[in-house]
Amino acid sequence: MTDHAFGSLDLQQSLETKLDKLVVLCEHLLQENQSLKTRESDWLRERTRLMEKNELARTRVEAMITRLKSLEEET
């Protein structure tokens, strides 16, 4: 083989190695992205749950204040 042929083989092997690394990186990033989407979804559900809980607490506190005011007015 000529030097040119060896150079082409080296270049081809180098490109194949880089391509393999890119494929591995891409797979890793896809997995990480899916994991982040799952976590985001979990956080959004938790946020919704906490907002509902907060609203319930606010409603109860308002009801207690109203009852206390009515008791105060009766005395």
Image (cartoon, rainbow, N blue to C red):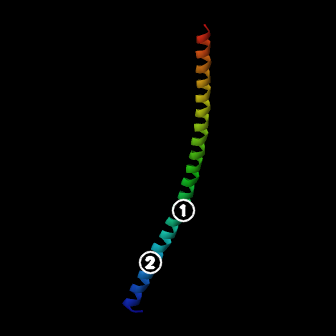
Q: Quadrant of residue 30?
A: bottom right
Look at label 2 and name its amino acid.
Leu
Graded by Cα atoms within 10 Å as few (under 14), some (14 to 19) or many (20 or more), the crowding at tag 1 reads few
Q: Quadrant of residue 51?
A: top right
Graded by Cα atoms within 10 Å as few (under 14), some (14 to 19) or many (20 or more), the crowding at tag 2 reads few
* Residue 48 against residue 19 in the figure, above or below: above
Image quarter of the N terminus: bottom left
Name the residue at the front extreme. 73
* Residue 65 against residue 74 in the figure, above or below: below
* Residue 26 against residue 63 in the figure, above or below: below
Foreground residue among 27 and 49? 49
Label 2 sits on a secondary structure element that is helix
Which residue is identified by label 1? 30
* Earlier sequence position, callout 1 versus callout 2: 2
1 vs 2, front mark: 1
Which residue is identified by label 2? 15
Q: Quadrant of residue 11?
A: bottom left
Q: CA distance from mark 1 to mark 2?
A: 22 Å
Foreground residue among 61 and 3? 61
Q: Is residue 60 left or right of residue 20?
A: right
Q: Residue at x 58, y 50 (%)?
A: 41
Q: Position of residue 72 (x, y in %)?
A: 58, 11
* Residue 26 against residue 38 in the figure, above or below: below
Foreground residue among 12 and 54? 54
Look at label 1 and name its amino acid.
Leu
Foreground residue among 43 and 65? 65
